[in-house]
């Protein structure tokens, strides 16, 4: 039996506590009526302050910081833990944020997808309720005690526990407990507790009696949310998001200043979202990216841009307007914060603060909003943020190349590597006829048996190849040694690559057939100014197939502009040079696109700003605009953000 013993002179339990002859037992006090608890708590606290008897060694908890402070809630980490920026502090580093857990409150724990551990019932509801109650609001924090919390293998962190008051709510923890979204922590008798512990227990008793939340007898059914961070899912659902127009969303996570993970309540889905028209600098990598070797170097003001977004939009309700989706499944569009007269375009806010730059292509094409361009100009003039440091040119360094006079020749494609990368042979090239005849004689003389030869990377030898009709020897350069006695070779007079057996498919080449006597016949080339997707992507395969259909097995006209890094830059025509080029046709179908502004300028500069290249730039821009407006090829989901262009 558990009960209270009353004496004519008062409660015996209170007398025992007042004289330091006992402690309050947490598990039994929960059985008492809430109105009978305060006298016992007052008596025990008096004995603690006087260090009587069992409390003779008692010392108040030592705190590493102030026991009371005001601040703004920046982020809710879990159902009972928050990050708060103390008033008067400048948010210029993550260390300025204080991590505070609600004293004597236990929220349902979130699971772990990596280990397959599920969320505890009401974990997400508790966290979201705490978000609604606190994020972005001014809070008063009373710290009651600190604990060392295990944090990874052999690591701990000192965590502060306290009562958080916001507005008229004296204790946010009590709100969660009263609504059945959290429970009170079971403490040992000598543990430090919240100063409002008895109020929390009383609130929990009421929630239990009403079968609320975690105390409910009914089965918990977790709400399933569709995750559209997968590129295929994002592309499939992008149409419905675009048709929604302006819609509400909640910012769940900030990747950088302009890239977020959002929850869209009306569609019950998570999306990865990037602001249109702008780019924010790269912030410092997180520890996970560093451990995986995927870290990107931080750029100036990258962290400042990210912190601004965390402080302004993280875990807030915003309004979004979706207008496209990238190949990587990132939904693009506009994001607005605030309501009524405080409503503003967040992208413009970032640009005006010097924490983002406007996409140069949008400026070139006249698509960037004038107010955004004007905001960037003002930030530049005032040297704000990014513009306060010297801008480093983004033009990449290129290897030296031999630049010849621009000329038009008839060619045949001998090998296609991708939608814009190929090898060709000049029609009626005397060298080609000489080497073809010479290798036929070489085959007739030596037969098709291999012979020992010096296998070194870069060495030119004779390699056996079956073209479907006959097996013959061809000149080949050794690229690398492969497994199981094979080597990878490049057939220098045709452009194809093959892995051949060293013992049976190689033999030394006659000195008279060396490249010092007869240069390689096949020339490596690239369609000038036309960029395509890699073959690993559908658009890349489609580009290669279209290129093959237009060029393979035909005599073509080629305008040779010069050579960069061993590749001849070519404008290719299937009839005559006055007809639309193959470069242009691929671009008009959305399977190629013109390079970035600095890439185009670089080519024009190194090729002597030729009239033909200038015309090609104009033709490609017009063709690209047609493809973009028609949503063809790579433009099917709208704009192509910078991360898709790398």
Image (cartoon, rainbow, N blue to C red):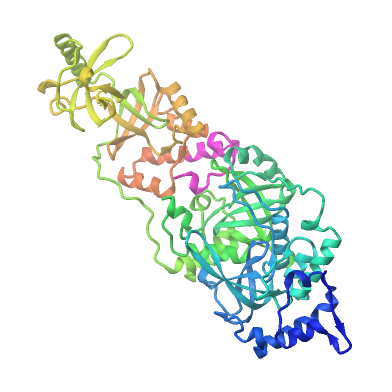
Q: Quadrant of the C terminus?
A: top left
Q: Nearer the viewer, residue 179 or 461?
A: 179
Query: Most extreme residue toward the right, as rendered?
Result: 8
Q: How many marks?
A: 0
User: Quick check: 450 left or right of 182?
Assistant: left
Q: Which residues are magenta?
A: 621-646
Q: Quadrant of the N terminus?
A: bottom right
Q: Is residue 591 visible?
A: yes
User: In the rendered image of this protein, does residue 243 appear above or below residue 259?
Assistant: above
- Can you give x and y, in whole percent of width and height, for residue 556 in the image? 36, 23
Q: Nearer the viewer, residue 80 or 310?
A: 80
User: Quick check: 161 left or right of 592?
Assistant: right
The residue lying at 77 percent from left, 70 percent from top is 28
- Can you give x and y, in whole percent of width and height, for residue 332 in the image? 60, 48
Query: Most extreme residue toward the left, as rendered?
Result: 511
Q: Quadrant of residue 522?
A: top left
Magenta includes 400?
A: no
Q: Is residue 371 visible?
A: no
User: In the rendered image of this protein, does residue 442 appear above or below residue 36?
Assistant: above
Query: Most extreme residue toward the front, as rendered?
Result: 1
- Can you give x and y, in whole percent of width and height, for residue 417 in the image? 37, 29
- Can you give x and y, in whole percent of width and height, for residue 468 in the image? 33, 11
User: Quick check: 156 left or right of 525?
Assistant: right
The residue lying at 58 percent from left, 52 percent from top is 276
What kind of secondary structure does the magenta stretch mostly adopt?
Answer: helix
User: In the rendered image of this protein, does residue 502 appear above or below residue 8?
Assistant: above
């Amino acid at each position: 039996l558990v009960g209270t013993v009353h004496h004519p002179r008062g409660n015996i339990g209170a007398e025992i506590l007042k004289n330091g002859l006992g402690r309050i037992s947490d598990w039994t006090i929960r059985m008492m009526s809430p109105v009978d608890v305060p006298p016992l708590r007052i008596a025990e606290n008096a004995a603690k302050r006087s260090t009587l008897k069992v409390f003779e060694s008692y010392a108040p908890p030592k705190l590493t910081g102030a026991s009371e402070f005001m601040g703004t809630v920046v982020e809710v980490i879990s159902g009972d833990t928050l990050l708060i920026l103390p008033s008067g502090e400048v948010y210029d580093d993550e260390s300025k944020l204080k991590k505070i857990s609600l004293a004597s409150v236990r929220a349902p724990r979130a699971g772990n997808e990596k280990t397959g551990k599920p969320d505890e019932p009401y974990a997400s509801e508790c966290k979201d309720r705490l978000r609604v109650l606190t994020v972005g609001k001014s809070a008063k924090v009373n710290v009651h005690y600190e604990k060392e919390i295990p944090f990874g293998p052999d690591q701990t962190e000192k965590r502060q526990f306290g009562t958080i008051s916001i507005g008229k709510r004296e204790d946010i923890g009590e709100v969660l407990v009263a609504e059945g979204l959290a429970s009170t922590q079971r403490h040992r008798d000598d543990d430090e507790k919240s100063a409002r512990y008895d109020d929390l227990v009383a609130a929990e008793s009421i929630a239990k009696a009403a079968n609320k939340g975690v105390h409910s007898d009914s089965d918990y059914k977790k709400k399933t949310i569709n995750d559209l961070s997968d590129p295929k899912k994002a592309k499939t659902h992008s149409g419905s998001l675009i048709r929604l127009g302006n819609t509400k969303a909640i910012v769940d996570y900030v990747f950088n200043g302009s890239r977020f993970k959002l929850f869209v309540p009306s569609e019950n889905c998570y999306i990865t979202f990037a602001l249109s028209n702008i780019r924010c600098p790269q912030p410092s990598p997180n520890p996970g990216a560093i451990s995986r070797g995927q870290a990107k170097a931080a750029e100036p003001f990258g962290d400042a841009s990210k912190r601004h977004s965390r402080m302004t939009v993280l875990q807030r309700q915003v309004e979004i307007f979706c207008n496209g989706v990238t190949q990587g499944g990132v939904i693009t569009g506009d994001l607005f914060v605030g309501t009524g007269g405080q409503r503003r375009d967040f992208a413009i806010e970032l640009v005006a603060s010097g924490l983002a730059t406007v996409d140069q292509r949008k400026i070139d094409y006249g698509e960037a909003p004038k107010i955004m361009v004007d905001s960037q100009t003002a930030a530049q003039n005032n040297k704000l943020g990014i513009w306060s440091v010297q801008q480093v040119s983004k033009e990449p360094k290129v290897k030296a190349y031999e630049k010849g006079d621009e000329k038009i020749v008839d060619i045949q494609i001998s090998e296609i590597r991708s939608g814009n990368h190929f090898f060709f042979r000049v029609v009626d090239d005397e060298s080609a006829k000489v080497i073809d005849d010479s290798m036929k004689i070489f085959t007739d003389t030596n037969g098709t048996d291999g012979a020992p030869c010096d296998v070194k990377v870069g060495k030119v030898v004779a390699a056996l190849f079956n073209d479907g009709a006959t097996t013959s020897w061809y000149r080949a350069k050794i690229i690398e040694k492969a497994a199981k006695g094979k080597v990878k070779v490049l057939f220098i007079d045709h452009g194809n690559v093959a892995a051949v057996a060293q013992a049976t498919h190689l033999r030394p080449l006659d000195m008279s057939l060396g490249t010092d006597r007869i240069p390689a016949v096949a020339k490596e080339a690239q369609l000038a100014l036309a960029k395509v997707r890699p073959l690993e992507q559908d658009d890349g395969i489609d580009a290669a197939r279209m290129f093959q259909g237009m060029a393979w097995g035909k005599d073509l006209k080629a305008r040779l502009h010069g050579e960069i890094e061993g590749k001849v830059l070519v404008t290719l025509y299937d009839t005559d040079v006055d007809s639309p080029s193959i470069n242009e046709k691929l671009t008009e179908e959305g399977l190629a696109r013109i390079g970035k502004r600095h890439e185009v300028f670089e080519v024009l500069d190194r090729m002597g700003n030729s009239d033909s290249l200038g015309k090609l730039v104009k033709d490609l821009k017009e063709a690209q605009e047609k493809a973009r407006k028609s949503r063809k090829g790579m433009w099917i989901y709208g704009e192509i953000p910078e991360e898709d262009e790398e």
